[in-house]
Structure formats: structure tokens, C-alpha cells
Amino acid sequence: MPQPDKRALLAQGLSAGDDDDALRARLVAAGVSLATAKYEVDRLTKDPMAGELRRQAARMAKQRWLFANQERLASGADGGFALDTLDAPDVDHFYRHYYEANRPAKLTGIVDHWPALQRWSLDHFASVVGDAVVEAQVERERDPEYELAKDDHRRLVRFAELIDWLRKDEASNDIYLTAYNSGTNAAALAPLWDDMAPIALLDPRRHDGFFWLGPRGTLTPWHHDLTNNLLVQVTGRKRVRMAPPWAFARMKNSRHCFSDWGNAALPPGAGDAETPPVLETIIGPGEGVFLPVGWWHQVEALDLSASMSFTSFRRANAHVQDYVSWGAL
């Protein structure tokens, strides 16, 4: 019978916050003799790595306490843990009570002035930019890690050919023009920007944005972004599910900003010991959702869907560098 890895068991116990008695019990349960377990645990008093693991475990325990407090406050608010809908929100009110509070919201009446709401269709796209060559994410259905491996799925296609395929109106998650493709597509799709106009909630000096187009069935799996985002629906509908940052332990985050829940349709509600609390909404043409930085979300197209997303808020939104410098990758 192979001998248990005592150092690995001790590291696991220290990371979990075990005291000396619990560490000895962990070793004995794995088949280590009581005398050896006592010797190994006693040695930890002179091990600087063990001391640092214990300090880290204490910091993590403090973090869990803080997250638990945030959950209690959110659940105890008027109306409980819920998603507000703001109609033509006042800019100052939005920033004070949502952007700065890291609180999501469904938004209506923010793009009623957009010509895109009447113009955008497959026919319009074909007539305005059909000859353009665009980049899309393709062959996603053959790869369960399609979102993590986005670079492997980048392909150049003629926009008119993609439009013809979309006219079939078949449910699919196999091809999708996403924000990740915007570096290539911004110039090719520039004429579509004439169909939009400034949004009061955003910085009026910037007119950037990210174009999304795909069939019903496209699915962006559970993840969190490294910026605050505004997602605006122009045609079709999307279901957006969200989970708060303070549910981190239940979001099964093992790689980068992605959740091991993947494409799971986590039910809306308060969650339980294993599943996170989830807010859910459906946005249709002219509606949007504010997705604060760090909030987990999953987005599913219920129809042929064209959307825009924006990060050009009136407040600082440069959180990526902190994420990298703190080693969160």
C-alpha cells in the first residue's frame, strides 16, 4: 500500500485552517501512525511555510466572514436579493446607487433614440456591410472549452455568407461574432455605428462598443468580466443570469475568470450551500443590463440576436491591470 503524502496532507490541513489536533487527526485518518502524526505536527512550529499557510488561512477565513456579511445584507434588503429595473435612469442616481455600489440592474429607455432599433435586420446588415470580411468564433460545439480557447476558434468569414447561414434560423452555439472579435471587426462594421447614438450613462467623449451577432442558442458560459459592462439588446432576446462576487466559493472558480459551472442553467433564487444565489432576467430590443465588475454571469440567446456592449463609463473602469499585478491570473 502506498504511503500517504504527509506534506501534502499537512498543506491541505493548514490551508483549511486546521489546528494542531485537527492536523494530527487528518494524518491518522490517512493511515499515518499517531506517533508519526505528532512528530510531523510538532515540526511545523519551526517551518516558516507552515506559518505563512496559517496566516493565509486566517485571511481567507476573514474573507469568508466578510462575504457572509454581504450576503446577509443583500438578502435583508427591501425586496430581498433582487434585480432592480431602472427606466431612463438619472445618471447621478445610476452611478451613486449601482455603478459605485457594484450592483447590477436591468435598464430600459436608454437607447430609444437609436435608429438601429428599427433598422437592424439581416437584410440591413447584408445591404450595408455584406461585402465585409469579419472574424467570428466558429466550431464552438466541438470544444467544451470553447470560451477558454477563444483564439483556437477565430476564423475570417465573408459577412454575407454568415448572414445567409443565419437566415436558416437554426438553434446553434457553433458560430458567434463576439466582443473578442471586435479588434478585427471594428473597421469592417463601422457603417453600423451610424445606426447608434450616444447613451447618457456613458462617457460622451467615447463612441466605442462591441458588436455581438449570433443565432438562438449561442451561450456564453459562467464567468466574470474584468471591467464594468453595459449590455444592450438591439434585436432578439437574451437571458442573462448573474451571481454576486460574494458567492465566490460556490462559483467553482478554478481557472482565470471562468466558473466550472460552465453552461449549467443555475436556477434563480437564494441558492444553497452548494449553489450560488442567482438573479435572472430577459432583455429584449431596446433593453439592457448593467453587469458590474466581478459579477458572475451567463448569457444565452433566445432568438437570432444582435447586441452591443460598452465599457466606456463616466467613472474609472481600468481594473484589468490590478487583476494581473495581483497574480489573479
Image: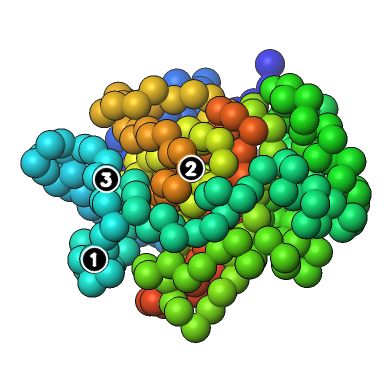
What residue appears at the point 84 percent right and 40 percent down from the top-left corner? Answer: 162
Residue ID at (27%, 41%): 83
Asked if one can make out residue 84 in the rendered structure from this viewpoint, the answer is yes
Residue designated by label 1 = 90
**Distance between the Cα atoms at labels 3 and 2?**
15 Å
Q: Nearer the viewer, mark 3 or mark 2?
A: 2
* Badge 1 or badge 2: first in the primary sequence: 1
Nearer to us of marks 1 and 2 is: 2
139 with respect to 253 (left or right):
right
Residue denoted by label 3: 85
Nearer the N terminus, badge 1 or badge 3?
Answer: 3
Give the spatial CA distance, label 1 vs label 3.
13 Å
Q: Name the image quarter holding residue 116.
A: bottom right
Q: In the structure shown, which secondary structural element does the residue marked by tag 3 occupy?
A: strand
Specify the amino acid type for callout 2.
Pro
Q: Are marks 1 and 2 in contact (CB under 8 Å)?
A: no
Q: Nearer the viewer, residue 22 or 201?
A: 201
For mark 2, what is the residue? 285
Q: Rate crowding at label 3 as few (under 14), some (14 to 19) or many (20 or more) other CA atoms within 10 Å.
A: some
